[in-house]
Amino acid sequence: MYQVVRVLLYRLLIVSTITLFSSILLFWFHGFLTAFGIFTLGISGILYCAQDLLLYYPNDPPDSRVFVLQPSNYKLPYESIKINNKDGLKIHMFLVKQPFNSKYIPTMIFFHGNAGNMGQRLSNVSGFYHKLNVNVLMVEYRGYGLSEGTPSERGLYIDAQCAIDYILERTDVDTSRIILFGRSLGGAVAIDLASRLEYRNKIWALVVENTFTSIPDMAQIILKWRCLNWLPQFCHKNKYMSLNKIAHVISPTLVICGSNDALVPPSMARELYMRCGSICKQMVVIPGGGHDDTWTCREYYPSMQQFLVNVPALPSEIGPFFEKNNESARLGVVLTV
């Protein structure tokens, strides 16, 4: 706890200094109880407002906000796109398209994790492009990479909606085969989008990797403060309540987790899988996969490819697909490859 408070106070030096001196003045003129109360409220406010500093790392590494690696470095054909979202902010995206017949193949919308920028995920995207033969729309959240603004939970949700709206307006892609992919924090963004009433019938498949049930749950695991068990939800600035939202997902869903993920426990993937509202769902545990390197494991792409090959093309095909390919989901069996 000391280390967390120290970092936050350092990064919010001006606000912390004002709070401290205000408390000293109040103590001098009004006594201990008043000063202690104001000091407690001030620190609580700082901790609440500073929760973003513990979750979003757009400057890691330090040049992530000024330098974004281009898909051409991986010899991928692409469009660099900037569009205005609902808040009037310019959001940067890469659309990596297959050279032939791209109108008749799936398009994946890629939501990355909480650090760096989308250019740092190009090696993984190259694997999707070559091994899964899909188009990939890479989304840069507000406050990340070359996108404008500051990251927030509401903001990331809006940016995700902006991305799918953009794809749905394209005439050169198959808008009936949209895949949402999210890793870690991106998984929470993808689940939110897939659970929304206005979008859930427009999503062909959902794939989430090494993602969590909620930020309050992650806070208890990482910080290990017993007081967090009784902390009201409104005290958490960022919630990302994926466990509740995934119950409203109806798209075929694949939940992937690495068996050696030291950050997000694989048990959270099981909870998400069990709560998922889709009748076409599957969970795959990748042996040896860590939080950031599961995608480098040998079984990763074949597992995803097998899932996508069997996803029904039309809603009417979901029943036969469920009976033929997803008996394990109905029985609650987790596949380990």
Image (cartoon, rainbow, N blue to C red):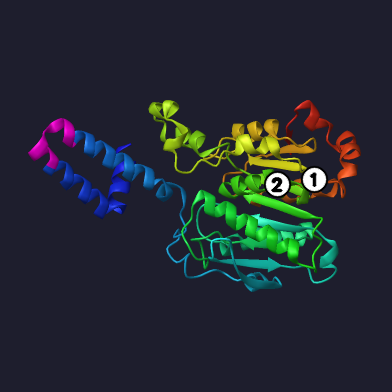
Element assignment for label 2? strand
Q: How many marks?
A: 2
Give amino acid for label 1.
Phe
Rate crowding at label 1 as few (under 14), some (14 to 19) or many (20 or more) other CA atoms within 10 Å.
Answer: many
What residue do we see at 47% from left, 66% from top?
A: 65
Q: Name the one closer to the observer, 316 or 214.
A: 316
Q: Position of residue 44 (x, y in %)?
A: 32, 39
Rate crowding at label 2 as few (under 14), some (14 to 19) or many (20 or more) other CA atoms within 10 Å.
Answer: many
Task: Tell whether position 14 is magenta.
Answer: no
Task: Find the magenta span and give its range.
Answer: 26-35
Element assignment for label 1? helix
Q: Position of residue 61 (x, y in %)?
A: 45, 61
- Residue, disc 2: 207
Is 33 situated left or right of 274 in this image? left
Name the quarter where the C terminus is drawn.
Answer: top right
Question: Is residue 126 at least partly visible in the picture?
Answer: no
Give amino acid for label 2.
Val
Residue 73 to residue 126: above or below? below
What residue do we see at 77% from left, 60% from top?
A: 134
Task: Tell whether position 34 is magenta.
Answer: yes
Tell me, yes or no, whether the two marked residues, 1 and 2, touch with CB atoms within 8 Å.
yes
Is 331 situated left or right of 157 in this image? right
Find residue 307 and name its label. 1
Is 62 situated left or right of 146 in this image? left
Magenta region, main secondary structure: helix
